[in-house]
Image (cartoon, rainbow, N blue to C red):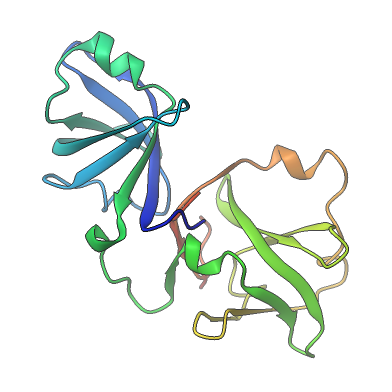
Amino acid sequence: MKTGSRVLLGKVVAAHGIRGGLRVRYFGDTPDHLSPNTDLQLCFSDGSVQIHKVDKVVPGKAREVRLFLNGVSDRNVAQSYKGANIFVSRQETKVLPEGEFYWYELVQCEVVTGSGRVVGRVRELWEAGSQDLLVVESDTGEEILLPTHKAIVPEINIKEKRITVVDFPGLLEPALAGESRKAGATKGVARNGTSQGDECTESIS
């Protein structure tokens, strides 16, 4: 999702070690945007923001990295960052390969079938296990969950803000009450076609 000129990269899970390290769950397929010397914006639940430059990034458990920030060298301080969302200025983001998109680019895209039937608009994206989901809201307010796989989403036209989907039987039915909320949290880079806020990337292959 777009938030001004920022891109959502991840979320602080907890402190790591005694020297101010942070456990960060990154959004998207890789943590490439969380790289040394990048200026990150940490946004807290009370609305406050702190800006820190990345000193070091170390691989962590699945879909996590250990992040060390300039000016944060105490575990207590690091622990106070738990739950903070991590953003970067759009100017800091890289040009993506063909077939990959930032999440904010997909939000508000019109979703249509190959025959031209309008399904709705993308309200947000969820990270759900190995597959990202488009959360599509119909004109009547119903919620439809669509996996971002090439077999289901064969075409994304960012210029025209249009996503074409295949009308498989039952695929475009509204999500069952209670089931849709089990899917997961919003994230930032989308890759059109493989399994897999503001802004992450999504790819569909």
Relative to 182, is 176 on the left or the right?
A: right
Q: Quadrant of residue 132?
A: bottom right
* Residue 203 appears in view: no
Relative to 7, is 157 on the left or the right?
A: right
Location of residue 13 with respect to 196 vertically, above or below: above
Residue at 12% x, 30% y: name it: 70
Nearer to us in this view, 72 or 165: 72
Locate residue 50, reporting x and y percent.
Answer: 27, 32
Residue at 84% x, 58% y: name it: 141
Location of residue 105 with respect to 133 vertically, above or below: below
* Residue 199 appears in view: yes
Location of residue 167 with respect to 102 vertically, above or below: below
Locate residue 4, reporting x and y percent.
Answer: 42, 56
Relative to 100, is 183 on the left or the right?
A: right
Q: In which quarter of the image is residue 80?
A: top left
Residue at 27% x, 61% y: name it: 93
Relative to 33, is 27 on the left or the right?
A: right
Locate residue 34, reporting x and y percent.
Answer: 25, 46
Locate residue 104, reporting x and y percent.
Answer: 49, 62
Residue at 36% x, 54% y: name it: 6
Q: In which quarter of the image is residue 137?
A: bottom right
